Image (cartoon, rainbow, N blue to C red):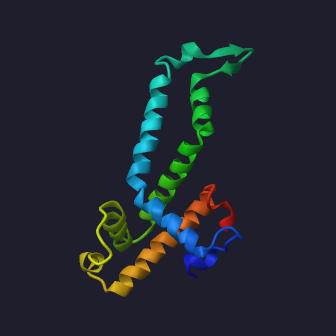
Amino acid sequence: MKAEDAITTTNRTSRFDLFRAAESILGRYRENVAYVERVLREQAERLPLTIQEEKVSVAGKILVDPTLRACLALDANETYRRRFIEVAAVDHVYRAHSPLHRRLIDLYYREKHSKEEMPGLLYVSESTFKRRRQEVVWAVVKELVRLGHPDFVGAN
C-alpha cells in the first residue's frame, strides 16, 4: 500500500494541500533545524550550572526545578513545537528510506537543484524521479500525522 493511500483528508484540506505543505516543510528543513538549535541553546544558557542548589524540596518532593521550568517553557512555545515536529519527521523519513531517497532529499530539497537536473544527478529517468519524490513527500505527510503536527492532525 502506498503512503498516500493511507492518508484521508478532511473537508478543509485536500491531498494536494497536504502534499504541498509537506514539500514546503522539506524545503525549509535547514531553517527549521537552525531555529530549533537556537531555541534549545537559549534555554540551556538560562539554566544554572549547579541545578542541585536551585531545587527546593519539601518532604522529598521537588517543588521548584529550573530544568522543568525550561522544558515547560519550550512546550509552551508553539513555533518551537511545530518546527521540532517538522525536523523530527524529515529526519525519520531520511533515516528510514533507501540511499536513493536520501540522495533525492539532499540534492532536491537541501541543495535546491532543479527538477530538470535531478534525473541526471540521480541517474534515473524523469518518471522514476517523480515517483521517488512523491514517495518521500507522502512519507513525510504520514510521519507528520503520526507525530501530531497541528496542520496534519485531521489528515489520518
146 sits to left or right of 42: right
* Total numbered badges shown on the rendered structure: 0
Determine the image quadrant of residue 107. Answer: bottom left
Where residue 4 appears, as percent x and y from the top left, is 57, 77
Where 129 falls versus 76 (above or below)? below
Question: Residue at point 63% right, 55% down?
Answer: 150
99 sits to left or right of 79: left
Question: Residue at point 67% right, 74% down?
Answer: 8
15 sits to left or right of 24: right
90 sits to left or right of 145: left
Quarter of the image with the N terminus is: bottom right
Q: Residue furthest right?
A: 59
Question: Residue at point 57% right, 15% down?
Answer: 54
Where 114 falls versus 67 (above or below)? below
Quarter of the image with the C terminus is: bottom right
Where 30 falls versus 18 (above or below)? above
Determine the image quadrant of residue 153. Answer: bottom right
Residue sitting nearer the eye, 91 or 150: 150
Where residue 145 appears, as percent x and y from the top left, is 62, 62
Where residue 39 appears, as percent x and y from the top left, is 47, 36
Determine the image quadrant of residue 97. Answer: bottom left
Question: Residue at point 37% right, 66% down?
Answer: 105
Where residue 117 appears, as percent x and y from the top left, is 26, 76
Where 147 falls versus 72 (above or below)? below
Residue sitting nearer the eye, 60 or 13: 13
